[in-house]
Structures are given as structure tokens and as C-alpha cells.
Amino acid sequence: MDEPIFVIPLWADLVAVGLGGIQGALFASGFRGQRRLDLLGVAIIGIVMGMGGGLIRDLLLNVTPVTLQDNWYLLTATVAALIGMLLAGLFQRLNALIVGLDAVVIGLFGAFGTSKALVLGLPLVPAVFVGVCAAVGGGILRDMIMGLPVAIMHVGSLYAVAAGAGCVVVATAHFFGADLVVAALAGIGVTTLLRLLAVIFDISLPEQRALYRRKVAVETRAIPIVKP
């Protein structure tokens, strides 16, 4: 039996992969640990960030990873990682833009993951779970490879919470009959908005704040924090 055809266009999937690759390379370029990363290490982290979410999504769905079935995925992730590495100095000065792109990437992977799970027939709750794993999967793989604490477990930035909210919007809207593309766009918007609000207003879960007291993330320190 053939697998259902997924509705997300290739260009949109590649945008998510490319932005993820840039994010990963920027993170690795600014890493200051006991062992500095060389150029290959930075490129690998960028590629992992760009392709990790899609790989985890498809493994959970027990389907052939689409990122390994088309040349453009790996090429896009590699080029994006190189761009992020070579232009790291410029991008770091555009901190607000990078945080915004990061929020969009989370929303894209979350919405795509949830949408694909729904197309393949998963119920609402498992579909949301797959979407959240796709949204945060690249970051988890990045931290594991670099030997760092998994960021979503410690940084109070509503990273996974924002992804989860967007995925719930996608699944709920589709359940009530909304077109899947429209539902995905709504989910991307919700995730992006919640993530940005969490950064700007320094919003975090009480358990996260008690466990790990610091500003939402190192890469957001240039963003003005609005205290209520």
C-alpha cells in the first residue's frame, strides 16, 4: 500500500532545513567550551540542526526519511551551515533577526511534523507529540553531539511549550475540518508568536525558572526584556 502524499511543498520543507542549518552553525560558531570546534565540526552541527527534526519525525512515523530521498535536503543543509559559519560575525550583530528566525523554524518543523502525522492517519494526541519532537529534535541532537545539557530541559524560554501549542492548533483545526495547509499556517503563527513573547517578556515555566535561573537563552541576551 502506498504512503499518503504529504501536502507540504518541497520549497517550504527546504526553507525549514536551511534556516535550521544556519541556526546550528551560528550556535556552534559561538561555542566556547573546553574544546573548540573546527570548521568541519561547525558544519556538522549545522547539518544536524537542519535535518534532525525531519529525520526524527519520519523515524517516529516509521516511514522512509524524506530528507534522504532527495539531494536537495542535504545540499541545502550544508550550504546553509556554511553560510551561517562564514557570516557568523554579521549574524551575531543581527541578534533580533536570528531569534525571530529561530521561532519560525520551530513553528515550521512542528507544523510539518504534525501535518504529516495527521496525513498518515495518527490520532490527534500522537500527531501533536510527533510535531513537538520534530520541532525540538534538531536542538536535542545538537546538544547531545556537543556534550551539552539538553537546552529544552533547562532554559526557561517556552521552547517546547511554544512548539506544543502550535502543534495543538494544527491538530485541532484539522480535526474540526480546516484545510491542512491553513491549519499548518495557523500553527506556525502561534508557535512563532509564543516563542517571541517568551523571549521579549522573559516568560518561563515556574519549574524551569526554579531549576535553572538565567535569561531565556544565551543567543537572546541582546533582546530587550520587558518587565511587567
Image (spheres, rainbow, N blue to C red):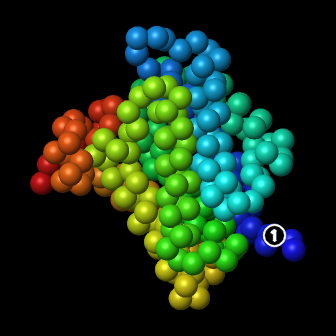
Amino acid carrying mark 1 in the image: Glu
Between residue 55 and residue 60, name the one nearer to us.
Answer: 60
| Placement of 221 over or under 208, stated as above or below | above
Q: Can residue 120 be seen in this view?
A: yes
Question: In the rendered view of the protein, which quadrant contains the C terminus?
Answer: bottom left
Residue 51 image point, x, y percent: 65, 42
Residue 165 placement, left or right of 181: left
Q: What residue is rendered at 49% in x and 49% in y?
A: 136
Q: What residue is rendered at 67% in x and 77% in y?
A: 121
Residue 126 image point, x, y percent: 53, 70
Helix or strand or loop: what does disc 1 sit on? loop
Q: Categorize mark 1 by other alpha carbons within 10 Å: few (<14), some (14-19), many (20+).
A: few
| Placement of 132 over or under 210, stated as above or below | below
Question: In the rendered view of the protein, which quadrant contains the N terminus?
Answer: bottom right
Residue 139 image point, x, y percent: 49, 40
Quadrant assignment, res 120: bottom right
Residue 93 image point, x, y percent: 42, 26
Q: What residue is rendered at 65% in x and 17% in y?
A: 40
- In the picture of the structure, the residue carrying the numbered disc 1 is 3
Residue 137 placement, left or right of 202: right
| Placement of 202 over or under 76, stated as above or below | below
Between residue 42 and residue 4, name the one nearer to us.
Answer: 4
